[in-house]
Amino acid sequence: MSKLESQIESLLFISNQPFSVRQLMNATKADKKDVEQALEALIKRYDEAVAGISLLRVEDKYQLATAAGNAQLVQDYIKEEFTGELTRAALETLTIVAYRGPIVRAELEQIRGVNCAVILRNLQIRGLVDAHDDKKKMQTSYTISLDFLRYLGIAATSDLPDYERLNTATSIEKVLHPEMRTPTEEKSV
């Protein structure tokens, strides 16, 4: 496997969105021909191997997905995993998104102190959280979904209990923006 193939595979693995050839060119600093050759090599590698994943292509967009032969297994697992109760970590994440959204993953992880990628993906699959791409900042922000609001029986996030107080909590702002901390608070961190 070439270095470019490895880089592209890593990018495709971490993303829950498809990549265009142009996006891959920009991310890897490679030219179009090399990116397309690397993608074709990856497609061939996954097709020839008995692998659990495959590389899908729709027009000029590429995304890793589970192998078609494992569809029922994956479907059964997802149904079981995502229809049960939310874990404590998922509830914490959902609460932060509800009260602080729109929020980017880095801010969320700064508040929680742990990686939240899998939890966010699970909440999106359940339809509780929506992702919005900010083209200018090149970041994805997260908000609670309209389905979640309907489930709670409220019309807006501002109708959440103690929304005003918790949405503007200075302690959370100080976690997100260390420059706001006083010298005494800095020592305790």
Image: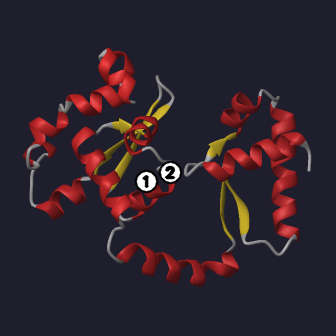
At x 81% / y 39%, what residue is drawn?
A: 35
User: Which residue bears the numbered disc 1?
Assistant: 120
Q: Residue furthest right?
A: 1
User: Which residue bears the numbered disc 2?
Assistant: 117
Looking at the image, can residue 5 be seen?
yes
Q: Nearer the viewer, residue 183 or 174?
A: 183
Q: Which quadrant is the C terminus positioned in?
A: top left
**Which of the 4 quarters of the picture holds residue 187?**
top left
At x 78% / y 42%, what residue is drawn?
A: 7
Q: Is residue 72 left or right of residue 144?
A: right
Q: Is residue 59 left or right of residue 163?
A: right
Q: Which three-letter amino acid code belongs to the residue tagged 2?
A: Ala
Q: Which three-letter amino acid code belongs to the residue tagged 1?
A: Leu
Q: Of helix, strand and loop, which one carries label 1?
A: helix
User: Residue 88 placed where, x, y %?
Assistant: 34, 63
Looking at the image, can residue 61 be seen?
no
Where 41 sits versus 136, above or below? below
At x 11% / y 49%, what residue is drawn?
A: 160
User: Residue 3 placed where, x, y %?
Assistant: 88, 41
User: Quick one: label 1, few (<14), some, or many (20+) residues within 10 Å?
Assistant: many
User: Quick one: label 2, few (<14), some, or many (20+) residues within 10 Å?
Assistant: some
Q: Nearer the viewer, residue 100 or 65?
A: 100
Q: Of helix, strand and loop, which one carries label 2?
A: helix
Q: How is the image coloured?
A: secondary structure
Where 18 sits versus 35, above or below? below
User: Residue 74 placed where, x, y %?
Assistant: 57, 77
Q: Is residue 147 left or right of residue 21?
A: left
Q: Determine contact: label 2, label 1, CB under 8 Å.
A: yes
Q: How many marks?
A: 2
